[in-house]
Image: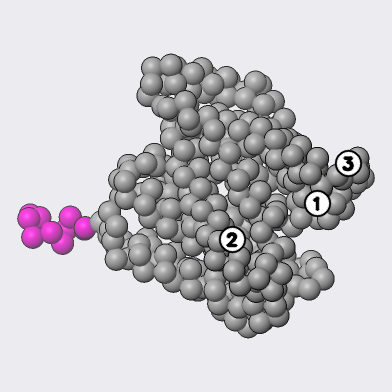
Amino acid sequence: MLCGSGMAVQSRVNGELGTRTGDPTGASLVSFGTGLIVVIVLALALPKGRAGTRRLATSLRERHLPYSFLLSGVFGAFLVLVQTFTTPLVGVAVFILGVVVGQSLGGLVVDRIGFGPGGAKPLTGWRIAGTAVIAGAVVLAESPRFGAGQGSATTAGPGLLVPLALLQVLAGVGVAVQTAMNGRTAQAADTPITSTLVNFAGGAVGLTVTAVIYRAAADLPPWHFPPEWWLYTGGIVGLVFVAAGAVLARVIGVLRTSLSLTAGMLSGALVLDLLAPTAGNLIEPVTVMGTLLTFLGLVLATLPWKVPRDPGNSPDAP
């Protein structure tokens, strides 16, 4: 959940950088680039990072891990691309809802088929109920945006709403797959440093191609760098998010990781809007209620809890 809160901070920082520069794809590339530089330094400087790179190379060479896992960062780049070009058309609320639904469905499937590092997990009623509660909580929390016209498809038109929403759901599914791939890469390398390096390298390549095409098509002026240092911290926050997600996927599974990140993202966004409001932000009682409901969804998704038996109360005890 703390990492999910970091996602809210990263979105605010990257969004502000995109607004200042007038180039959202370039801002996302800067975020990925700064994160990539930091993780390269860590991978080279720390013995754990150097050993993890060697172990990953061995796993790839011996076919224990597919080479396609090196492209896990492309899913993150795809999410940024979808966010950049669909949010102005369908609104923030639709985008958040689409991604959450995609993450939830993707997490259920990834855990069920055992694609994640934790192996196959049963599709229990509690997990389905927790996922449904969190999806409903997102709808409730974002409902003020719909009412204010920020979540409607007024710009795109009714005919484009469904295709664009499906694209956002697909991006959310990609995030769940990315989390599973990062977890397995960290497992093979025995360190999240290596999986984070792979993730940021792939994402940086994908965003470089996207930024070049976008800038050429939009005929944008030369990129300028705002002087505020904090506008370039989004990549560092992303490092923590990716590394923690890779570790958590091994421990609690992809679905629970995705749901926890969603709860943290809504909570972090609410705190940010309260402490540092921006123009047009909406905080209503249902926003708070929806955010609190995500915690209930998390509780349901972790049931049933296994309570250790007291040997002294066992019928076999002397």
Q: Is residue 208 visible?
A: yes
For the point 41% across and 45% down, the residue is 251
Query: Mark 2 or 3 closer to N-term?
Result: 2
Tell me how far mark 1 sits from mark 2, CA to CA.
22 Å
Quadrant placement of the C terminus:
bottom left
Q: Say the numbered circle drawn on residue 18.
A: 1
* Vertical relation: 104 (above or below) 37: below
For the point 83% across and 55% down, the residue is 19
Main SS, magenta region, reads: loop
Q: Position of residue 35 (x, y in %)?
A: 70, 37
For the point 66% across and 32% down, the residue is 205
* Vertical relation: 94 (above or below) 234: below
Q: Position of residue 302 (x, y in %)?
A: 37, 60
Residue at which label 3 appears: 223
Query: Mark 1 or 2 closer to N-term?
Result: 1
Query: Mark 1 or 3 closer to N-term?
Result: 1
Q: Position of residue 259 (x, y in %)?
A: 48, 59
Tell me how far mark 2 sits from mark 3, CA to CA.
29 Å
Q: Find the magenta span and give its range.
A: 309-318
For the point 27% across and 54% down, the residue is 122
Residue at which label 2 appears: 164
> Three-letter amino acid code at disc 1?
Gly
Q: Which element is circle 1 on?
A: helix
Mark 2 is surrounded, within 10 Å at the Cα level, by few (under 14), some (14 to 19) or many (20 or more) other residues, namely many
Q: Which element is circle 3 on?
A: loop
Mark 3 is surrounded, within 10 Å at the Cα level, by few (under 14), some (14 to 19) or many (20 or more) other residues, namely few
* Vertical relation: 243 (above or below) 100: above
